[in-house]
Image (cartoon, rainbow, N blue to C red):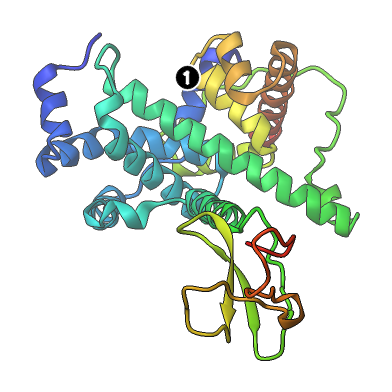
Amino acid sequence: MDTPLVELQRLRSGDQAAWRDLHRDHYPRLWSSVQRILNNPATSDDVVQEAFIKAHRDIHRFNGQSQLGTWLYRIAINQALDTVRKKTRTERWLSFLSPIAGEDTNLPPLPEGEVAPVASLGLEHADTRERIGAALAELSAEHRAVVQLRLIDELSLEETARLLRCKPGTVNSRLHYACEHLRRKLNRRTED
Amino acid sequence: MNDPQLKTMLLETCPVKPGQEARAWNALQERMQKPASFALPWRALLGGAVAVSCAVALAVHFDQPSVAPVSASSQAPGIFATAFYSRGAHAQVVWLNGLDPATDGPTYMDPSSQIDESAPAHSPNSL
């Protein structure tokens, strides 16, 4: 669906009220998506702010043939993934200087065994939300990004691979690993 | 637990706290009102600095005369020669000091080469 021309013109003219509406409508989803990838609230704040700044600067380039929210989402996700890449590069350098530093980022191998189905999980409870958030936080940023893009946002395999700059097979294996990890953690805690 | 169930659970994570959006908007508004020049990324600044440095280096390089300055020495006492490159004329110029005031007669830098004007016209020294 196209973005209404009137709305686009207001944004292009720098109408503060239009930008305020856009921010109010899209900020929650953008922040949650970015936070699921980065797992760092302060960095997520910066990334989402930077996404809006970019949108403000480049709004004249937006042709209006897609949803404004989708365009904003792409900017924010790209910004988040750039942040992950920068962090990975820094950690690689740090591990090069001090080989012990990078070892903690490796994920532990998944234990063998069947995954039991989870009984009704009341997500209305904050503790359940915290538990799944903690399970998500145990994954690496690359795995969290796959979960966000492929599972939650339902992007295509090719699109996810393109955004993450990896092969489609890598996307599939990361998604499989991440989902198994989340299911196992949730089941274990439910059993406890 | 299947993927849709997992997705539903994950969607519940990372909620925005009350007042967070308003605070973020205030911070964003401040940045939006800043002049565009302040938003220049450091890479653009670095690229600009490199471009200016290259331009200055090229200008200095091409401003140098293609002919190296040469020095000249006088051939007679009291006569001094100064050589320099003239950018205006695009040529090497030799400036002479100490010559006698101009006369109708020729000026000789080496007095020993002075010709005898009283000599007959068919003399080989005749002008």
Mark 1 belongs to chain: A
Above or below — where is A72 with respect to B34? Answer: above
Res. A12 image quadrant: top left
Q: Is residue B13 visible?
A: no
For residue A51, side relative to residue A128 (left or right): left
The answer to whether residue B11 shows anywhere in this view is yes
In the image: residue B30, left or right of residue A52: left
Position above or below: A127 against A113: below
Amino acid type, mark 1: Asp
The correct choice, above or below, for A117 with respect to A104 in the image is above
Report x, y in % for residue A112: 87, 23
Q: Indicate the position of residue A150 as horizontal and vertical percent values.
A: 56, 17
Callout 1: SS: loop
As drawn, which residue projects farthest toward the right?
A: A99
Left or right: residue A37 compared with residue A192: left
Q: Classify 10 Å Cα crowding around label 1: few (below 14), some (14-19), many (20 and above).
A: some
| In front of the other: A80 or A57 | A57
Percent position (x, y) of residue A151?
A: 55, 18
Identity of the residue furthest to the front in this view = B120
Residue at horizontal 30 percent and vertical 39 percent from the top: A57
Image quarter of residue A97: bottom right
- Along the viewing direction, whichever of A113 and A101 lies nearer the viewer: A101
Which residue shows up at 61% across the image and 58% down it? B64
